[in-house]
Amino acid sequence: MLLRSRTASQARESEVTPRNLVLSRRTALAGAAAAFAVGGIPSMSGAAGLSFQTTVRPRDEKADPIAPMKSATTYNNFYEFGTDKADPSRNARALRTRPWQVAVDGEVVKPATFGIEDLLALPLEERIYRLRCVEAWSMVIPWVGFPLAEILKRVEPTGSARYVAFQTLHDPQQMPGQRGPVLQWPYVEGLRLDEARHPLTILAVGMYGEVLPNQNGAPIRLVVPWKYGFKSIKSIVRITLTRDQPPTAWNRSQPNEYGFYANVNPEVDHPRWSQATERRVGDFFRRKTLPFNGYADEVAGLYAGMDLGKYF
Ligand code: MTE
């Protein structure tokens, strides 16, 4: 993400085509290996595989090859571990992701705390989504996770619940970036309840068929493919249903630059740069940015009648 003093470009994208394959752990890994072949991925030795069901793939794999795993795991934004793209892969190694719990509370009938093992036991799916960062770069990444709606269903939101707030772990001992004032900690994010319940919105526990690397938000992070990457909050410990729109880390830091909605929109420029095009990490040429990151058919209806220049 972007500080005033930095110039950068970053982005996320996605496209979808259903595929009804239930894969065993072995075939899941084979599938992941095939995906790697598309993007030229390194060896998987030593990594823990995940069982998943492949449901979402790029519409045009030629135009949208999967990013090399090395790019997705070494070019990151995770300010808790430093502001340089290479910092998270270097500094997040020591993050302890077990034991880990996610509390779900607020405007719900049945507040609950889920252990990470329980969440990993849910039926998992692979979602090949384009991630477009607000810094105008993008990557195609095969995530493994489950719809956020699954969890929301279990806690039974009350009739007053309108938003969902998310919070990252706050532990300056483990997260050196939290010892400085670069953002107000912990990192927080939010969605409207209908956005949170949308079937494209997932909680990811893996990528490339493996458990999520620490630098990508282990053990569990949000992925909202039609929004700029900063909405996809990492290393989540709390999810709270609220009546009022919750604060979000980047909006709190620079409200004129980062709105609550953060829908990918080529027509609404960031105050300091255009959002009309993006650079796919690894590509030389830029490409046009698509409204809602290519998911307009699925999600534009959520914003019918809203002025997206005002609600950016
Ligand atoms: N979550 C936390 N807790 N801290 C962060 O700094 N950065 C966000 C988002 N989630 C961030 C975060 C931004 S700006 C982006 S673009 C994505 O994570 C990057 O995800 P990736 O590194 O897995 O590509």
Image (cartoon, rainbow, N blue to C red):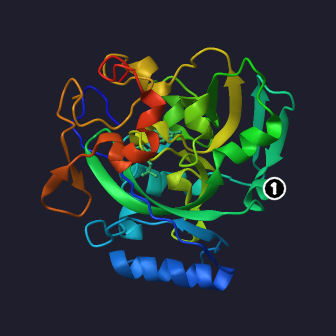
Q: Nearer the viewer, residue 235 or 16?
A: 16
Q: Nearer the viewer, residue 225 or 69?
A: 225
Apparent side of residue 6 relative to residue 185 in the rendered image (left or right): left
> Which residue is located at x 45 percent, y 56 percent?
90
Q: Position of residue 285 (x, y in %)?
A: 12, 58
Q: Position of residue 144 (x, y in %)?
A: 58, 62
Amino acid type at image mark 1? Asp
Q: Secondary structure at mark 1?
A: helix
> Which residue is located at x 48 percent, y 32 percent?
302
**The quadrant where residue 117 appears:** bottom right
Apparent side of residue 107 relative to residue 57 in the rendered image (left or right): right
**The quadrant where residue 121 appears:** bottom right
> Which residue is located at x 70 percent, y 34 percent?
238
Q: Position of residue 42 (x, y in %)?
A: 42, 79
Q: Is residue 201 placed above or below 310 in the rendered structure?
A: below
Whether disc 1's CB lies below 8 Å from ligand 1 is answered no
Q: Is residue 289 placed above or below 104 in the rendered structure?
A: below
- Residue 248 visible (yes or no): yes
Q: Is residue 245 placed above or below 198 in the rendered structure?
A: above
Residue that label 1 marks? 118
Q: Quadrant of the C terminus?
A: top left
Q: Quadrant of the N terminus?
A: top left
